[in-house]
Amino acid sequence: MEAFFVSILTVGIAEIGDRSLFLALLMGLRYRRPWPIFAGMALGLFLNQALSAFFGIWLFQFLSADWQAWIIGIAFLIMAFWVLIPEDEEVKENLSKRHIFFAAMLAFFLLEMGDKTQLVVITLAGGYQAFWPVVLGATLGILMITTPALWFGYKFARHIPVTALRWSASILFLILGLWVLLESVGILPEVSLLQIDHLLPSIES
């Protein structure tokens, strides 16, 4: 149980001020359907933590962290312009029903690739030699931070015009994309608001 609770604490702290929090806020603002977003977010985060714990460093042998960062960053910059395009209401309704879950799952899965949280999970899983406690604890830790942001975005979206929502989403995607790219070239340090290195278990012993 120690691995489970330590994973909740360390990963939760690492997520404070991280990109995933802003993505949750963005999706709540944009789509106004919190439950499929939450379900997709939870599954995407779970799958990412599971891959981190199971495959570890091997996961990055085929694609370097720098290339991952560029792909993700450029994708978010494209999204920054795409969300400004007005949508037909019927198309938007069908999209909401069929694809928001998968969009959220893919977005959160990709955003966590190469993130500090992923490295924390690799370290915790290796240090404790525990797969499920670390994966479940890490997923819960992230959800404890991102879920309030998602709900706030959903509630706030009801009170602002659609045009303002589009521009808000575009700006947030632009920030996320630039954030990832600036981290990849070393201009912006890859840190969260709180440092968590001292909380990680020692794997030397």
Image (cartoon, helix red, strand yellow):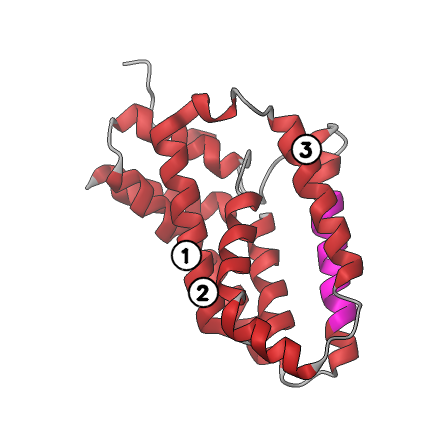
Q: Amino acid at mark 3?
A: Pro
Query: Vertical placement of 4 versus 37: above or below?
Result: above
Residue 1: x percent and y percent? 19, 42
Q: Residue at x 69, y 40 (%)?
A: 180
**Crowd around label 3: few <14 · some 14–19 · many ≥20 (10 Å):** few
Residue 187 shows in the view = yes
57 and 119: which is toward the camera: 57
- Label at residue 25: none
- Callouts 1 and 2 close, C-beta under 8 Å: yes
The residue at which mark 1 appears reads as: 42
**Disc number lying in front (2 or 3):** 2
Q: Amino acid at mark 2?
A: Phe
Does the segment drawn in magenta span residue 52? no
Query: Vertical placement of 28 versus 15: above or below?
Result: below
The residue at which mark 3 appears reads as: 189
The residue at which mark 2 appears reads as: 38
Element carrying mark 2: helix
Pick whichever of labels 3 and 1 is earlier in the sequence: 1
Locate the C terminus and report the quarter of the image it occupies: top left
Residue 34: x percent and y percent? 49, 72
**Crowd around label 1: few <14 · some 14–19 · many ≥20 (10 Å):** many
Q: Residue at x 34, y 21 (%)?
A: 202
Q: CA distance from mark 3 to mark 1?
A: 27 Å
Residue 68: x percent and y percent? 62, 33
Q: Say whether residue 32 is left or right of residue 2.
A: right
Q: Which residues are magenta?
A: 166-178
Element carrying mark 1: helix
**Disc number lying in front (3 or 1):** 1
**Image quadrant assignment for residue 49:** top left
Q: Amino acid at mark 1?
A: Ala
Residue 200 shows in the view = no
